[in-house]
Amino acid sequence: MNWIQKKPFYFIVILLLGVLAALPWLAVSYTLTLVFFLSVYLTLALSYDIVGGYLGYMNLGHSTSFGLGAYTTAILLNHGFSLILALGLAILLAAAFAAIVSYPLFRLRGAYFALATFGLISLIEVVVTNLRDLTGGSGGISTPPGNNLLPAYYLAIVVVLGTMVFSYYLARSQFGLALFSIREDEEVSRSFGVPTSLYKCLALVISSVPASLVGGVYVWNMTYISPHSVFGLEIALSPIVMAMLGGTGTMVGPVFGAIFITLVQEFLWTKVPYFHLTMYGTVLVLLGLFMPGGLVRTQWVRPLVQRLGLGEEIEYFKKS
Amino acid sequence: MKKRLLVLVICLSVTLLIGVSMTAIGAPKAIHIGATVSQTGHFSSEIGPFKRLMNAWADIVNEKGGIMVKEYNKRLPVKFTVYDDKSDQATAKKYYERLVTVDKVHLLLGPYSSPLTFGASTAGENHKVPFIAICANSPKIYTRGFKWIVAVIDIGPRYTYRYWEMIKDEGKAKSVSFVVEDTIHPLGVFKGSKKLSQEAGLKVLSSDVVPAKTRDFTPIITKLKDKNPDIVYVSSNIPFAINFMKQAREMSLNPKEYHCIHHSGVFRDPLGSTAECVVGQSYWVEGMKLGDTKLITDVLKRANIREPMYPWSPAYVAAFQIVQAAIEKAGTLDNKVLMDNLKGLKLDTVLGKAYFHETGYGSINTYPSQIQNGRYKIIYPQEVATGKHIYPRSAWK
Amino acid sequence: MLPDLIQLLVGGILLGGIYGLAAFGLSITFGVLNVLNLAHGEFLMLGALMGYVLFTALGLNPFISAIAVIPIFIIAGIGFYLLLLKPISEKPPHQLLVASILITLGASLVIEDLTAFFWERPVTGIAYSLPSLDLAGVVVSSTRLLILLFIFFLAFSLQLYLKKTYIGKSIRGITQCLEGAKVVGIPIVLVSALTFGLGVALAASAGVFYVTLFTVTPVMGIPLSVKYMCIVVLGGLGSLVGSVVGGLILGVAESLTAYYFGAEWSPTIAFILLILILIVKPEGLFGTKE
């Protein structure tokens, strides 16, 4: 795929980046907030998909890393740490937690794994709530007040773009190939010499990094979080739905899913006074019935994505 | 061909995104108030239908011609723009930003609960739009040095101060045990009440902070039966309290008094006779001698909302009155003038005297009310009481 | 201290009975159809609301309502299955998981939203209670005891049903080997739909008891679904006895933890138990290795 054929692709990318960079001057703070949350959710969807899509283990508890990152950052910021240091330590904590928890969890498969990871969120939520001296308990925790929307916006954009690029190269690396092989058939993969336990643990740790990072950026912008807001159902399920809807197991899938769902939700919530949740639920049901492989695997979007050179992983989806 | 189509599609989407966030800017044809209501999510059981409440009040005011704004020398109608915040912080924050920057409202009314108000109030503060918090009484909201926020109600720890005054006056109760739901509001009320009870001369025998989702209270009630306090004070939201009381009855826990801070009709109905003699807190009860309650009954009737089911509705009505009074006093919709007038307001609302403290929190507070024969009676203070305090309660067998 | 301990154990077992009953229906659907059904809690909630209506409008005793709702919800469940789940039933396991989450989550949101809009009461409960029994200082809730007996009876009769009747054996056949079942000529769609209907009806039945003992809100469904799925996994997929036992164990564990460690730690015990048991025995307590 030489670069002359990719010229329109690069053009689009540069155009988009330009718009994103100039958005504070082109639009109001509501739009910035909207794009900020879109970036947060997209980062979560992309990082979820490393384990959920590439590795094939549905980690419904992905938001645990997000919440841990958010709380650690909040606590450190309140103790006077600089943002960079706070974020860095938050990532380390979340990664360490992911490493520890991967040993018991990866003994499970399929729906068992999904359920157990989902239960993990409640466990951590309870623990965080109970350590009320450290975390403020159910009352939540406030960070030093201030209007951080502008820098947080740019930071979120950088994080999400970085995660996209990382996910892209991961899918095309040897490590990524190993993950795909584990997904397709774990026993065969192991018999070919892939260190499955180690790689599964690595995948979980890697996926926890963008999640915890974006959790820290989130709390820096919100200046307040409560256990429910970072460990609740909304933040747990939405990124996963986005990844599944867009197309799990690919890099562009979550991107499509996140943008699609954000636009649909925004439209429903601002233009439809009642029953917007019903409509949203109906959309999910329809997508589950007719497009469970996701948007990128449909006949309309797939050729588009493949022309852009982003569609290699689409074919890898389990056919058995 | 396909590539150009793709470029076109992407450019269109980007413009759409920016476009979705712009609306036409017009001259003030109406007083535009913005708010979010938790139509969906776990707070929907507290204020789900309150969009109707706001529109009902707007209709009543507009039928009289609207609110007088001196600057334009005419009455302007009231218009609400209300979004659903899904009981979610991030969504609330996003829509308050939208209300201010896209819908360009003149005033903001707060969402339900302190956690949502933390984020929502930043929109008012950053864009200098007056923000009136309604159901948000965590003290931490008002210690951030914000200049553009006032609150209708008093802070959480003082939620039941009148009850403890009454207990102290009577001098009969000697001990209390607390059962607390681990949620921000009940926790705040408990912290204040613990101190107030000690100042009233009572001994605190035990305090149990229990997760919000707890449905089985056998262990706690077993403990309480051993301790045998005079008052069992349940600081919680309603589902928690209902479950506690049912099981307390099954296990025959018989203190001299039960206090459940939230005990509206939603609490009373599933309990039947178990709810008898339970004391709780109410902002307003039908028949109480407090201000002009005709407005409350009119608005509720118009909106088809029953107060026993949605006990926060009177607080919203008080907020509407505050908005109206502030605009009339300021004579203009200019942000700064409006905010200054809000802060300095002293108004007799449907729930009593409203004024705002330095950091923004309000003065309106609840009264102790007891369920007697299935009806709610305010039992203290004398000036507004509609019944007498029954103490001790009749024990269950 | 001993009387307290006994009280806790009794309380825990009674609580576990309720858990078991609700998880019961899920064990059938999850075990047989391999569908991660997030909508299970919605049917529990709907059954609860129907129980409320029957109690307040017709004065129907909850124990009768619990049986009365079963036929209605079998039909509802069959409809739900044929409309939403049958289309994806032939998909490969990974896609099935993804699709079932999307569909059942979407369905849950729709049910919640519509219920919240049309049902006026934000919190629902019924004032029904039986006098408690006092056995040598230990208070036993009669309502919960009856529920426990009800679910034992139900579990027993369902086990009989599965072992003896044609439909029952068909269900077990489908669980054990789908291909074999097809070869033998079992009407897969019919039996699957009926199974789902049965599972959903049991959830609704549990819902009637739920509204008697606790309170019900339109949005309680999804967290409940997750909790009961954990119980089913704990007890072992495909084992009805397992979900009952799992529920009982959980009830006792929560009760003891709340008393000895403090109530704030009792929600953690559910998950810790689940993880421990799954590590030691990945199929669950009574599950069979695939």
Image (spheres, coloured by chain):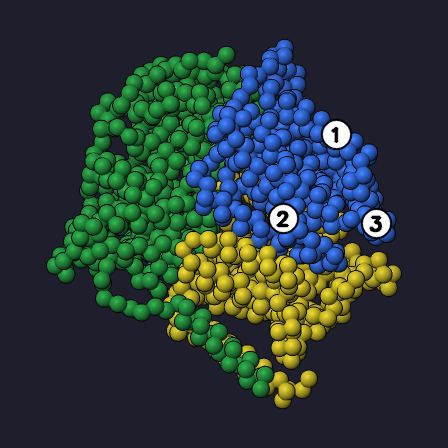
- Chain to which the residue tagged by mark 2 belongs: C
Q: Amino acid at mark 3?
A: Gly
Q: Are marks 2 and 1 on the same chain?
A: yes
- Of marks 3 and 1, which one's residue comes earlier in the chain? 1
Q: Colour of chain A?
A: yellow
Q: Nearer the viewer, residue A186 or C95?
A: C95
Question: Mark 2 near mark 1, Cβ–Cβ under 8 Å?
Answer: no
At 57% from the left and 27% from the top, the residue drawn is C62
Q: Find residue A40 and name its label.
A: none
Mark 3 or mark 2, whichever is nearer to me: 3
At 81% from the left and 39% from the top, the residue drawn is C166
Please tell me whether mark 2 sits on a helix, a strand or a loop.
helix
- Name the residue tied to disc 1: C157
- Answer above or below: position of C197 versus B197: below
Work out how far the residue at label 2 is from the one at label 1, CA to CA, in angstroms: 25 Å
Q: Colour of chain B?
A: green
Image quarter (top left, top right, bottom left or bottom right) of the N terminus of chain C: top right
| B148 left or right, relative to A47 | left
At 63% from the left and 12% from the top, the residue drawn is C135
Within the image, what quadrant is residue B250 found in?
A: top right
- For the question of whether residue A44 can be seen, the reply is no
- Of marks 3 and 2, which one's residue comes earlier in the chain? 2
Circle 1 crowding by C-alpha within 10 Å: few under 14, some 14–19, many from 20: few
| Residue C22 horizontal/vertical position (percent) | 64, 35
Please tell me whether mark 3 sits on a helix, a strand or a loop.
loop
- Name the residue tied to disc 3: C185
- Name the residue tied to disc 2: C80
Q: Nearer the viewer, residue A262 or C151?
A: C151
Circle 2 crowding by C-alpha within 10 Å: few under 14, some 14–19, many from 20: some
